[in-house]
Image (cartoon, helix red, strand yellow):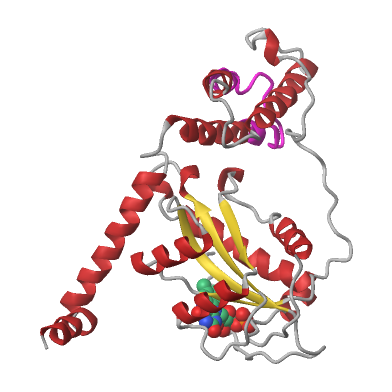
Amino acid sequence: MFGKIKQYIYNKTKFGRTRYLNYLYQYDLKQYFDNSLMGIGEEKKLATQIRLLAHAIEKGFSLSVPKPGFGKKKIIELVYLYEKYKLYKNPEDDQIRDVVFATLNAYIQFQKSNNIDISFIPEQYRQNGKNDIKAGTAYYKLLENNNFAEIAYARHSSRCFSKKSVSEYTIKEVIKLAQTAPSACNRQATRVYACINSHKIDEIMKMHGGLNGFDKPSVIFAVTGDLNLYQNEFERNTVYVDGGIFVMNLLYSLNAFNILSCPIIWGSEPDMDGKLEHLLEIPHSHKIVALVVAGYPKEKEYKAAISAKREVERILYYVR
Ligand SMILES: Cc1cc2nc3c(=O)[nH]c(=O)nc-3n(C[C@H](O)[C@H](O)[C@H](O)COP(=O)(O)O)c2cc1C
């Protein structure tokens, strides 16, 4: 009996609901504090600091008129941080070396072409070593036959899928395309867990509750954000912004491969997080942003809700 009363207070009264909300915020706060730069160990901290610095330097190149000689302090700091990072054997972020050297190469080339002294950069960092990635700037052409309107108006959330499986190769291509999404400071914190295990898909459908009546999808993507890549209080919501933008790109990317999809809400309640983390082996340092269910259509034409949009005048405010 007491259980029911307690449940009622929790679910129906303002007191109960604000208490529960407060509990969820405390859960988010602890997860963010423990796993962002505010709480993590040095190796991960260094990797994030290096990526952010490299981006800050690259940004300097992308201005209309980059200032010759800019970024000296940042380059010194980059080298200093990398000196510490390279002491770690088998670093988790094994792209850091390439990020540092690509940034330095671009910086040195730019400053040299402006006759700026770069002797403050240690000799061993001035070598043009082999590098898998590039930094600096490039010139990109604007598209002439831009058909984005066609693509955008053709996307609809679908809850009907065929039984055809989506190959791992296709999933990889889909995610590669979705990686064109922008992210804050290009830190690319978003991670994707593509669940193609039939039993686990059933488990997720059972535990979620919001998937009742859906056809069984061939893939369930859990889109997460690695909190290790966020710095401070100011960035507490950025994981959702980065993740949300990525999800949108993922939906378009799936459509580009003729795969239907529907984004699925994730409330990030401790119990639910725990279950999904366990099922998909997601570390608790990742914030689960949303799920996306996906599968091939049954026929060429597929059924979807119309989901009418508001009139544009109702959401747009000109500030003149
Ligand atoms: C963050 C988010 C969570 C969603 N969660 C669910 C969900 O749990 N179940 C569902 O059937 N649809 C879900 N949807 C799909 C929306 O209902 C759908 O996007 C909306 O009706 C607009 O339709 P459209 O995607 O076809 O434009 C979600 C969409 C978003 C963006």
Q: Is residue 282 left or right of residue 99?
A: left
Residue at 59% x, 30% y is 90
- Give the position of the C terminus as an image quadrant: bottom right
Q: Is residue 118 left or right of residue 310?
A: right
Judge whether residue 8 can be spotted in this image.
yes
Figure quadrant of residue 106: top right
The location of residue 96, given as percent across then percent down, is 62, 32
255 is higher (above) or lower (below) than 2: above
Please identify the residue farthest to the left as the structure is shown.
2
- Give the position of the N terminus as an image quadrant: bottom left
The location of residue 98, given as percent across then percent down, is 69, 30
27 is higher (above) or lower (below) than 161: above
Q: Nearer the viewer, residue 20 or 236?
A: 20
Residue 68 inside the magenta-drawn segment: yes
Judge whether residue 310 can be spotted in this image.
no
The location of residue 173, given as percent across then percent down, is 77, 60
Total label count?
Answer: 0
Query: Which residues lie in the magenta part?
Result: 57-77
Please identify the residue farthest to the right as the structure is shown.
144
The location of residue 104, given as percent across then percent down, is 69, 23
In terms of image quarters, where does ligand 1 lie? bottom right
Please identify the residue farthest to the front as the structure is shown.
199
Residue 203 inside the magenta-drawn segment: no
301 is higher (above) or lower (below) than 296: below
Q: Is residue 166 left or right of residue 314?
A: right
Residue at 70% x, 25% y is 101
